Amino acid sequence: MTFQNMPGQPHIAYRGNELFSEEIRLSDLAKEHGTPLFVYSKGAMLSALGAYERGFSGRNVQICYAMKANPALGVIQVFAEAGCGFDIVSGGDMDRVLAAGGHADKIIFSGVGKTRAEMRRALAAGIGCFNVESEAELEVLSDVALSMGLRAPVSIRVNPNVDPQTHPYISTGLKGSKFGVAHERVLPTYQRAAQLAGVRVVGIDCHIGSQITQDGPYLDAVDRMLDLVEAIEAVGVPLHHIDFGGGLGINYNGDTPPPADLLWGKLLAKLDARGFGQRQLMIEPGRSLVGNAGVCLTEVLYLKPGAQKNFCIIDAAMNDLPRPAMYQAFHQIMPLKPRADAPDTYDVVGPVCESGDWIGHERDLAVQPGDLLAVLSAGAYCMSMASNYNSRGRAAEILVEGSQVHLIRQRETIADQMHGESLVGRKRAG
Ligand SMILES: *Cc1c(COP(=O)(O)O)cnc(C)c1O
């Protein structure tokens, strides 16, 4: 059988009969570092960032990598060195950015449930902006800032009520969503913010969903956002920046999201037409910067033929790759060294004791136990959602840069997992 190289994944390709990431033969990495193993291409990340930079050339923009997609320090470092800011959703995220060399003033803090302690720490660090998600949060933030003798820079995350036409679990900008301030409450919330002594209004923000593959929802959101900006400024609250969030999709399975530069060409034309083209803009892309830069390498443990189905049991599982179990998501699965044999159809499953532990349904593969596979498009929302379910240690992570290999996270040991636990009435284990 023939294997096509994946469109949208220029840094993953077969050379001869071997799958490579940049200049590195993936089977060599699996041999040296074991499996499951995440491998990220720095070149792929920078080329994804480059598409945004092209789209915004000549504009005032701050690209804030939404680091929940992949918070590895080595990944954050790539974007910090490229000049990005960061969209964080917890105090822990902030610590990671600072540890990886990111600057506090380029951090924006999103999330519906910021605690007072997180607010205090972010204020002390001097972050760039809080994306406030409710009226109640605004009051608390003002109190916390006042108690420190500070004014918190704020942007209100508004819910523009547009349908991103993606999976319901990753839609965030519809009326029934827990995110953002409802459209009809936006104006009063800004008026309240303008009165509060502990906050300073700097912007407006939205984020309508994730894995968006059409430009329509973005075009609608831009119109609704600009309507709001006009209305807010008309009541005397100036806005320094407009933040359009993230959400651009990637190609998992023949998906055809617009390239970032083309999408932003269209959106900026709309901003220009409405007189907002020279505003300070912000965006918060996550998946589209890292998703197709990563693969997860895994070994075939057993083949289990069945009356109804054949199973291909691999050593990666839902704790490493949670997206199929969570959202019925699709990841392409390819052999590191394709065999010439005729393929069989398999459900590719992990060792975890859950029927939801599947990685791919009905895949045609020519495989034998001991073969190595690559689960593609595994750079975003895989390792970041990995768990220790079934006492499985989290995988190691590698960053590939040309012909250089950097181990950016060691494989988690059982001692790491048991750290901090104790037996009742006895000395600590481990
Ligand atoms: C998750 C998230 C993003 C990034 O979304 P992607 O789909 O990964 O681009 C951006 N902003 C906020 C507030 C988020 O929660």
Image: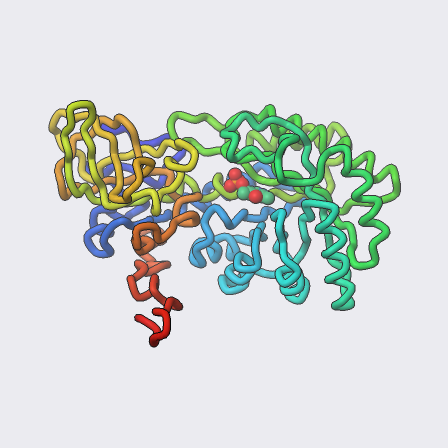
Q: Position of residue 290 (x, y in %)?
A: 44, 44
| x 69%, y 28%: residue | 270
From the viewer's side, name the closer residue of 252 and 48: 252
The residue depicted at 73 percent of the width and 49 percent of the height is 136
Name the image colouring.
Answer: rainbow
320 or 98, nearer to the observer: 320
- Where 152 sits versus 318, above or below? below
Please state if 420 lies on the left or on the right of 194 as rendered.
left
Any part of residue 404 in sight: no
Residue most extreme to the bottom: 427
The image quadrant in which ligand 1 is located? top right
Q: Residue at x 34, y 76 (%)?
A: 427
**Where residue 202 sits in the image (x, y, percent)?**
75, 50
Q: Image quadrant of residue 237?
A: top right
Q: Is residue 362 visible?
A: yes
Q: Position of residue 344 (x, y in %)?
A: 17, 26
Quarter of the image where the N terminus is located = top left
> Which quadrant is home to the C terminus?
bottom left
Q: Position of residue 94 (x, y in %)?
A: 56, 59
Quarter assignment of residue 379: top left
Between 281 and 173, the one lying in front of the other is 173
